[in-house]
Structures are given as structure tokens and as C-alpha cells.
């Protein structure tokens, strides 16, 4: 059956490749042939190869704080922020907001939840209940092909929070460390197959790592910094990497620019294999097994909350004030010229982010 009557399939497919991702649900509902076409992994690969894919910056961002007046007429600010998922279309600069999580999550996203992308899917993992502050083992998956949420299989084992999390961008999400509900730091790690909706335990890490950072780079899941139970906030200088091909953790590595008692840097890997980190106002790149300073973050970014590497560009988002606040700033750096350009970012604290190409 022809995709479009009286048109060769290659021409019809080219038409589908050029549509906006927002039209995918409509396209999929037209007929089985179109539904099958946009659901194929080859379809997304062809969009990328033909430069018709769209890059989306996805942020867990607080709504602007609500203001009202108390009985005496004084201005009152609601202290507890409500987080939702904001989406920036990189090409158009248009901001949109995803529908709320399923299950009547009227209080917004879990606090300190993790966001990662796998193919056309956004995965929201863990965090703290915004009302009870209890650790959540929840998993929610939003498909940008169907514009619908589904509830994934919950994370196995103890309920953990403040863990390191990263994806291979293709199929799996890896989680390591954090602490349990007794505030005990963890060595355990797990991996989630998004397509199969299945969790598997990984071998344990060599040491406990609460509040660690993580990134996926060159076929390895890197877990950086963190601290053991008895250290309570005294961050270590070591990292360790899990090789997904051998299913083994490598030896502990000491990172020279990590300091005790300081949270580890936020790292991001590029498609060309480069690994970047933002650390104390500097931009670092990992080259020849060593970290090298290659630039400085704009001075009005005080606390970096998200870093991403795109082709030829570095994206940095953080707090625009010293300490926690609503002001948020974002910049894109042209890596060839080291020139920073400010992003138009909505007001509201950002707690996590990811890029997704669809």
C-alpha cells in the first residue's frame, strides 16, 4: 500500500521526514502505514541524516513563585516551588510545557528527580515527593512520537535518592549510588532497558557514593565523586567507570581537580567523544587522560545546574544569583570561537535537564 496515493514511497517518506515532531501523533493516527513509518528507528535516523530532526532542550523548572497577600495585607511568597517540564525548540526558540505526570501528580515533578533521554523518549526517575519528602522509586516515560506518558517499572532495590544517572542515548538508563531512606550511602547500581521496560542489577561499585554525578562517555558509565555514609558531605576525589561491553567496573581513578567537601562537577559528553566539565567557574575538557581548562563560564552563572555538549557548542544553565533563587540564566558557547551567547530562559530554578533529538 502506498504511503501517499499516486506518489512514490521515497517522495512520500521525504514529506513525512520534514514534518514537525508535534505532528507525529496526528500522522500516526491517519493510517497503519504512517503509524508504522514514524515508529521505525530508521525514520528518526533518516530525519537526523537529512537534517530534518529537531533538537529539544528539556528542563525540570520551577514555576514562577506565587505571590498573594495575607490577612494583614502583607505580601506573601509561597516557599515551596512546583516543578514542571519546560521544552525549548532549539531552532525556533519556542518554549512549551509537557502535560503533567500521570496519576494525578498535582504537586508537580518529584523534587531532585533525574531527566534523561533515550531515542525519542524522555525518562523521569526518582526524586522526592514534593509533599511528604519521601524518596520515590517512580519511573515515567514520555514519548515524543505519541505525546503521551506511560508509567515505567519502578526502580528495584531500596528507594534511593541523590543518585548519579545517565543514558547511552540509544536504549538504556544507568543509575548508581545515592542514599537509601536511612541516609546510608550506596554502592549499588542498576540499568533500565526502556524498550523492554525492565531493570537489571549491575555489579556494585568499589565504594559508596552519595550525591555523585554521572555521565556516559565512550561506551562507559562514569560515576564521579560522592561520599560514604560516615563522611557525610565530605566529597571524595575518586571516580569509577562501568564498561558496558565487559560488564565490569574499572579501577578507582583520582581526579586531580576534585576537592574534598566540594560537590563534584557536572560533566557532559559530546558525540565526537569530548568530555567537558564545569568546575568553579571554569570550562574543562578531558584530553589525553588529563583535564585541561579551555575557558570560563560567564560571571553571572553562579551555580551550574545543567551542562550539555552539542555539535560545536556547549550549553550551560545555572542560577543567576549566589545561592538558591528563582533567577535562572543560560548560555551557549561556540567552541570554535569561545564566544558565549545568552539563552532566553524562563524565570524559575532549574533542577535537571537533558537534550533530545527527534
Image (cartoon, grey):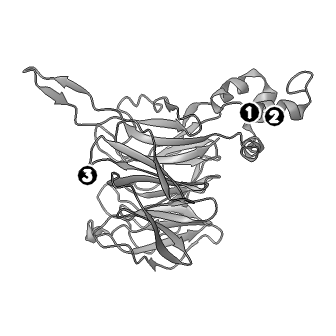
Name the quadrant containing residue 108. top left
Horizontal side, residue 93 vs residue 72: left or right:
right
| Marks 3/1: CA–CA distance | 43 Å
| Marks 1/2: CA–CA distance | 6 Å
Residue 143 in percent (x, y) is at 60, 36
Q: Circle 2 sits in a helix, a strand or a loop, which is it?
A: helix
- Does the residue at mark 1 contact the one at mark 2 (Cβ under 8 Å)? yes
Horizontal side, residue 8 vs residue 187: left or right:
right
Q: Nearer the viewer, residue 20 or 192?
A: 20
Residue 58 in percent (x, y) is at 50, 41
Q: Nearer the viewer, residue 322 or 143?
A: 322
Quadrant including the N terminus? top right
Q: Is residue 92 visible?
A: yes
Q: Can residue 97 be seen in this view?
A: no
Crowd around label 1: few <14 · some 14–19 · many ≥20 (10 Å): few
Which residue does the image show at 47% across and 73% down from the upper left? 292
Residue 354 in percent (x, y) is at 51, 48
Which residue does the image show at 53% across and 35% down from the upper left? 93
Which residue does the image show at 30% across and 40% down from the upper left? 326
Rendered position, 129 above or below 336: above
- Does the residue at mark 2 contact the one at mark 3 (Cβ under 8 Å)? no
Q: Which of 72 and 172 is in front in this view?
A: 72
Residue 72 in percent (x, y) is at 7, 21
**Numbered tag placed on residue 322 in the rendering:** 3
| Marks 2/3: CA–CA distance | 49 Å
Name the quadrant containing residue 282. bottom left
Q: Name the residue under label 1.
A: 18
N-terminal label among 2 and 3: 2
Quadrant including the C terminus? top right
Crowd around label 3: few <14 · some 14–19 · many ≥20 (10 Å): few
N-terminal label among 3 and 1: 1
**Numbered tag placed on residue 14 in the rendering:** 2
Amino acid at each position: 500500500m502506498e504511503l501517499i496515493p499516486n506518489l512514490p514511497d521515497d517522495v512520500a517518506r521525504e514529506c513525512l521526514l520534514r514534518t514537525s515532531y508535534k505532528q507525529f501523533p496526528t500522522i500516526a493516527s491517519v493510517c497503519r502505514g504512517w503509524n508504522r513509518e514514524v515508529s521505525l528507528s530508521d525514520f528518526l535516523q533518516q530525519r537526523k541524516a537529512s537534517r530534518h530532526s529537531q533538537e529539544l532542550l528539556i528542563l525540570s523548572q520551577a514555576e514562577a513563585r506565587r505571590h498573594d497577600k495575607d490577612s494583614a495585607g502583607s505580601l506573601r511568597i509561597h516557599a515551596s516551588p512546583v516543578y514542571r517540564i519546560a521544552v525549548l525548540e532549539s531552532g525556533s526558540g519556542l518554549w512549551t510545557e509537557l502535560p503533567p505526570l500521570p496519576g494525578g501528580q498535582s504537586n508537580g515533578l518529584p523534587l531532585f528527580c533525574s531527566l534523561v533521554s533515550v531515542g525519542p523518549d524522555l525518562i523521569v526517575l526518582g526524586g522526592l515527593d514534593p509533599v511528604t519528602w519521601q524518596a520515590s522509586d517512580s519511573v515515567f516515560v514520555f514519548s515524543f512520537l505519541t505525546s503521551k506518558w506511560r508509567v515505567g517499572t519502578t526502580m528495584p532495590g531500596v528507594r534511593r535518592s541523590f543518585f548519579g544517572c545517565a543514558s547511552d542515548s540509544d536504549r538504556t538508563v544507568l543509575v548508581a549510588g545515592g542514599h537509601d531512606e536511612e541516609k546510608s550511602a550506596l554502592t549499588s547500581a542498576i540499568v533500565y532497558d526502556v524498550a523492554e521496560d525492565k531493570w537489571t542489577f549491575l555489579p556494585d561499585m568499589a565504594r559508596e557514593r552519595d550525591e555523585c554525578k554521572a555521565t556516559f562517555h565512550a561506551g562507559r558509565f562514569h560515576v564521579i565523586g560522592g561520599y560514604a555514609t560516615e563522611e557525610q558531605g565530605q566529597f571524595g576525589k575518586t571516580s569509577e567507570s562501568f564498561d558496558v561491553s565487559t560488564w565490569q567496573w574499572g579501577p578507582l581513578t583520582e581526579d586531580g581537580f576534585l576537592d574534598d567537601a566540594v560537590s563534584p562537577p557536572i560533566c557532559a559528553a559530546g558525540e565526537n567523544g569530548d568530555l567537558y566539565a564545569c568546575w568553579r567557574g571554569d570550562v574543562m575538557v578531558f584530553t589525553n587522560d588529563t583535564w585541561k581548562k579551555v575557558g570560563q563560564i560567564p560571571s553571572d552563572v553562579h551555580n551550574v545546574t545543567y551542562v550539555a555538549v552539542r555539535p560545536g557548542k556547549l550549553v550551560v544553565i545555572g542560577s543567576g544569583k549566589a545561592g538558591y533563587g528563582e533567577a535562572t540564566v543560560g548560555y551557549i558557547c561556540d567552541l570554535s570561537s569561545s564566544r558565549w551567547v545568552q539563552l532566553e530562559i524562563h524565570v524559575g530554578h532549574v533542577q535537571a535537564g537533558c537534550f533530545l533529538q527527534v
